[in-house]
Amino acid sequence: MPCSAVNTLGFKSVLLVAVLATAGCGGAESRKARHLEKGETFLAAGNFDKARVEFRNALQIAPMDSGARYENGVVDEKMGNIREAAQFYQGALDSNADNVRARTSLGRIYALSGGSDQALAIVKPGLEKHPDDAGLLTVRAAARIQLKDEAGALADAERAVQLAPNNEDAVAVLAGIYKSQGQIDKSREVLQDAIKRLPSTVELRLALAQLYAASGQEPQVEALLIDLVRLRPDEKAQRLRLAQYYMRSDHNDDAERVLRQGIKDLPAEHELKTGLVQFLAARRSREAAEKELAALIAANPKDFELKFLLAQFYEQGHEDPKAAAVYKGIIDAAELDAPGITARNRWAVMRLREGDVPGGEKLIAEVLAKNPRDNDALILRGNLELAQKDPKSAIVDLRSVLRDQPNSIGVMRALARAHLANGEPALAEETMRRAFDANPKDPSVREDLAELLVNLGKPLQAKPIIEELLKQQPDNFAALNIQFKVDAANNDLTGAKQSAEEMASLRPKEALGYYNQAAVAETEKRLEDAVRLYSKALELAPDSLESLQGITRALVGLNRGADAVKRLDAVMSAYPASPFAANLKGG
């Protein structure tokens, strides 16, 4: 073959490859654009599930595309998956630091979750490049108001509304700042003007309704909530909100009317049916609620959600035999399909609560025989194993659940307890820190982590964790008790005394505050005070062995051994089966 022919063929091959590659790129780009466009359409229609599918498809085509990452964040935020949304927004910024929408959204998440400093750090680079971006200014205003910088917050919010008068977030923040400053008329005026410009806004109407409610302008509140139902007739949330308003104002007939009309208009929305049943139970009678549920089930005999609602109704009323009969009926009808599995899990919980461990274990075994990875059954078995002093088996089951639910707070808390029971304190701490990182705003997680650190001999590490919780919830009794333990372990008797006094003041009819006060008094050698406080604790909790032990020590320390013996004899008479008082007396 002539060289010229070879060269020509080679050139054509290279050209063909280049054309195909170009066509492939163009095809991928157009497919990505189509998915994003369809996703936007579904998002606007409120169909978040389908929007998410389209945005995920776009991301598969272009995994590093900043716009696709941002849209995935938007739909996750709409669906309440805030942690995942924040990750997508951060990913969008990693791909394109000048993605202002992603920067605004991520900053807003931080501001709304109380992370004001993080929000400011996020928006700062954006404002340096785009000083007149209304979204970024709004986030900074929200962060500044939390940091008590009212002047800066007001300047940012007013500027944002001036730049973008139809930005709902900006209007809401500005109205909120005026309200916090006591400028109620200006706040109301800002909201009313914006609603005229944005006649379909929901959030601004809700903000105005809250403003009217705070001023006692009930007719205006009612009118706004009725208007929301008119604007969004297909949204159950608006019906429920109006019904709740009527219930709060004791307009029970109106509340029932709204719920029944909602069920008629939106028959597929179970929350409206649940709302009606709960309303009837609370405001009419349990008999009326039970009758309504029976009628709903009769009209929809294959609706398992209604049957589960009936079982839950019986459980809440402590009518366990009736609840068990409903669960058995679901199991008979659904066998090992999804409703039957759910019924077994819920019935197992009820049986374990009643102390029927074999019955609960049998139901759990049936579920796991059908699906060895059923998370609810594994959680039940894991907690049961932990209660039965089998932490190794519990660890296996709970770890299996975490593979599917890596951010499950309840599972991580149980797993931490299992590691601790298994003599693995380092793993227990690691697990609780993961739970804390996953949801630092969860009070129970803060409490568990702080208490674990105290028990592991790390009170200095526990101190800032529990102090931050008490800043947010100064009346949190459990947190105050942990604060007491932290201060006591750090030999800070002044702090421990203050925590104990706050506990006793907060709950004067509970023994724990007085017991903690007594412990401080005993440590400080104020034995008369210790006796008085331990006595008060024993009055409120006569079977408290710790308080009995404490008052015995204090009386012996005061050379009042006879009084100690007399008190112990009284306890032995009241609790003859308990050996504790007798052992103390022997000592």
Image (cartoon, helix red, strand yellow):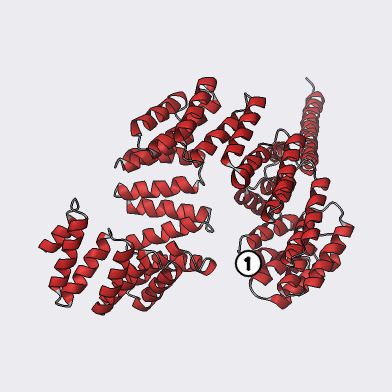
Question: What is the quadrant of residue 94 in the picture?
Answer: bottom right
Occupied quadrant, residue 191: bottom right
Measured as percent of width and height from the top left, residue 384 is found at 36, 39
In the figure, is residue 277 to the left or right of 479?
right
Say which residue appears at 71% left-offset and 64% top-offset: 139
Q: Find residue 296 and report its horizontal and vertical position in percent.
A: 65, 30
Q: Is residue 285 left or right of residue 362?
A: right
- Residues 344 and 458: in front is 344
Q: Residues within 10 Å of mark 1 (few under 14, many from 20)?
A: many
Whether residue 525 is visible here, answered yes or no, is no
Number of numbered tags placed on the structure image: 1
On screen, residue 240 above or below 509: above
**Is 156 on the left-hand or right-hand side of 107?**
right
User: Where's residue 272, x and y in %?
Assistant: 68, 40
> Residue drawn at (43%, 39%), measured in percent from left and top?
379
Residue 500 on image: x %, y %: 38, 71
Q: Residue furthest right?
A: 197
Q: Disc 1 designates what residue?
A: 116
Residue type, numbered disc 1: Ser
